[in-house]
Amino acid sequence: MPIIAKENQDTKITARWAVNVTDWQPTEEQYTHALNSIQTEERERILRRRLKQDQKLSLSGRLLLRWLFHSVYQVDWEVTRFGRSKNERPILISPEVSKIDFNISHHGDWAVLASIGNFEDRRQNLNVIGVDVMKIETPDEPISQYLRIFREQFSEYEWCTINSPNISEQEKLQRFYRYWCLKESYIKAIGSIKTKTQLYVINEPCPEWKFEESYLDRNHCVAIAYYKNKGDDDANVKHTIVDDLDRTLPFKILDVNHILQYAKEIKG
Ligand SMILES: CC(C)(COP(=O)(O)OP(=O)(O)OC[C@H]1O[C@@H](n2cnc3c(N)ncnc32)[C@H](O)[C@@H]1OP(=O)(O)O)[C@@H](O)C(=O)NCCC(=O)NCCS
């Protein structure tokens, strides 16, 4: 995979936020407060998750969403209403704001949010941003055997890059996850899997779409896909330097307990 070390300066991305959900160990009172600070249907959806970690991941995503409108767009916490598209993508119902799009993702230890504002509405109200975070997990079976299961999801070029003869099995796994994460970020931007043509976005870069890729820590890669604004430069995939995690981290790490200080109870 070619590494182009380029910082992203001039985009209209308004937030790249992450919370470490494993580090968030709420008291019972804080947890109840958090659950009461989101809409009822979302609270019920979260409480249907069996594992506490899964509940916390999803809940943190919802809190990030509300925090976005509260802290960046100065909308009162309890005023914002979200719904979901037919593909379950979270969308804003009210207040009415145009040219803002957002997406959340959670996996492993992290919940993340990416949002974009003031984009040129060249896609006529279609979604323009997607984010995906993935924990790089070592499978029980040999890595090459595990990767073969996903062969069909990758183009020839991607497959060769992942299975490069000069790299370790662990590096192959990392490349696999990085590609997967990029693909998922694009799928999440458009809101659904339509056809296999989406895979061409990465293999033969499509000029309208741009990607950012980085690591939150050694085990978690994160990718953002967004529809390109006029004036952005032409690099399609922006990678941060893998060995330089701390200095290049574009995501801002937030603390859920801090967000909760501003959270209000939502009735209904
Ligand atoms: C829609 C899809 C992309 C969501 O993937 P996921 O791994 O569950 O998503 P993440 O963990 O990153 O994020 C979950 C959040 O994404 C958001 N989300 C849900 N559906 C979404 C959609 N259709 N589009 C964008 N965002 C969506 C939600 O906020 C969700 O969190 P919540 O339900 O707890 O509120 C997934 O279900 C899917 O269909 N993936 C395609 C699999 C595949 O073949 N990939 C090929 C890669 S080569």
Image (cartoon, rainbow, N blue to C red):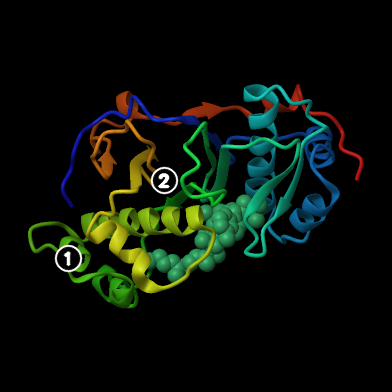
Residue at 31% over, 58% down? 201
Residue 19, x across and y down, in percent: 56, 35
Residue 16, x across and y down, in percent: 48, 33
The dot on residue 227 is 2
- Res 192 visible: yes
Q: Residues within 10 Å of mark 1 (few under 14, many from 20)?
A: few
Question: Vertical placement of 234 versus 174: above or below?
Answer: above
Residue type of the residue flagged with mark 1: Tyr
Residue that badge 1 annotates: 157
Going from the N terminus, do you reach mark 2 or mark 1 first? Answer: 1
Instruction: Please tell me whether mark 1 sits on a helix, a strand or a loop.
Output: helix
Taking the image in four quarters, ligand 1 sits in the one at bottom right
Residue at 37% over, 29% down? 249
Q: Nearer the viewer, residue 45 or 245?
A: 45
Question: Vertical placement of 204 versus 144: above or below?
Answer: above
Q: CA distance from mark 2 to mark 1?
A: 23 Å
Residue 187, x across and y down, in percent: 46, 59
63 relative position to 79: left or right: left
87 relative position to 180: left or right: right
Instruction: Please tell me whether mark 2 sits on a helix, a strand or a loop.
Output: strand
207 relative position to 185: left or right: left
